[in-house]
Amino acid sequence: MPDVLLSAPTKNSVQKTLASQLLSTAGASDPISFSDVDGIPNLPGVLVINRVDSNGTATASKREYIEYSGTSGNTVLIKTRNVDGSGSALTHAVGSIVEWTPDITWAVRMYTALSQVIDITDVTVIKSGITFPTPILLAPTISGATLSGTIAGNATLPGTITLQDANFGSRKTTIYDNGNAGASLAIDLDKGETQKVTLTETMATLSLVNMEEGDYLTLYTIQDGTGSRLATFAQSGGTVEYPGATAPTLTTTASARDILGIRGFNASISDILASSLDLS
């Protein structure tokens, strides 16, 4: 199993005492017990037992560094005894001083991890051939930035965006197919500014949804194989207006196609500007 990074305590100068005797025979996954684990995160780490005694006197012959895998209740779980190889696994009495201090094991793990990514002779240089996972930015705020390259995926950019010399890679607009209208259908502008619908009932009510001020919708109406299908338009929460107050007359021959240009005057009023054209 590869070495893991070792965490630091969440507080400075953490010092505890053993609540239970730690035998020299204790091994991997065995607990080291304290009265509490305040300041010790449930992450891999390293501790030292009996670096000093209760009087603060160094006790090198009793000292042992131990790597642990994390916390469990008021214990940490042993991973490796005498992890720095400076001595051997020892028996430690109840009340022995336990500390969390920067040590060789912690430092070497950090150095090893960083050296896999950066040039150790120049820490400002990232090694070639390093592959980073695709970053995910959650609700970032970008102020006064110059963006270049490709933004992939589904991006939501709220607020006012000023584009200077913008180059949009494609001029193609997909025609959203609403399928068969039946007796009624919601034409939702959120599904695209160019849409089509097939009329399959004698009279279909086409409701314009999410039309806001300045929105433009190009709508193709298609007669089914029977023809003689008509449509009436309704604005969700408002009204639809026509030039001369006269609704356009659809071509009703079988399989005929008409095109309508619809503009949102505001969120309550939509104007059908262009008369239907027989494209059959």
Image (tube, rainbow, N blue to C red):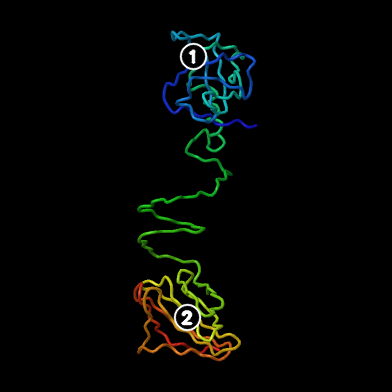
Locate the N terminus by quadrant.
top right
Q: Please report the residue visible at 55 percent of the width from the left and 81 percent of the height from the top.
A: 198
Q: Please report the residue visible at 54 percent of the width from the left and 84 percent of the height from the top.
A: 201
Q: Is 84 rendered above or below residue 210?
A: above
Q: Where in the figure is residue 66, as x and y percent of width and height?
A: 57, 20
Q: Which residue is labeled 2 in the image?
A: 205
Of the numbered discs 1 and 2, the one sitting upstream in the chain is: 1
Amino acid carrying mark 2 in the image: Thr
Q: Nearer the viewer, mark 1 or mark 2?
A: 2
Amino acid carrying mark 1 in the image: Ile
Q: Where in the figure is residue 142, as x and y percent of width and height?
A: 38, 52
Category of crowding for the residue at label 2, using alpha-carbon neighbours closer than 10 angstroms: few (below 14), some (14–19), many (at least 20) = some
Q: How many numbered marks have been drawn onto this rendered protein structure? A: 2
Q: Where in the figure is residue 89, as x and y percent of width and height?
A: 61, 14
Q: Is 171 rendered above or below residue 65?
A: below
Category of crowding for the residue at label 1, using alpha-carbon neighbours closer than 10 angstroms: few (below 14), some (14–19), many (at least 20) = many
Q: Please report the residue visible at 55 percent of the width from the left and 45 percent of the height from the top.
A: 132
Q: CA distance from mark 1 to mark 2?
A: 81 Å
Q: In front here: 28 or 19?
A: 19
Q: In the rendered image, which quarter is residue 268 located in? A: bottom left
- Compared across the picture, whether 255 is left or right of 268 comes to right
Element under disc 2 = strand
Q: In front here: 3 or 92?
A: 92
Q: Please report the residue visible at 38 percent of the width from the left and 51 percent of the height from the top.
A: 141
Q: Where in the figure is residue 85, as x and y percent of width and height?
A: 60, 17
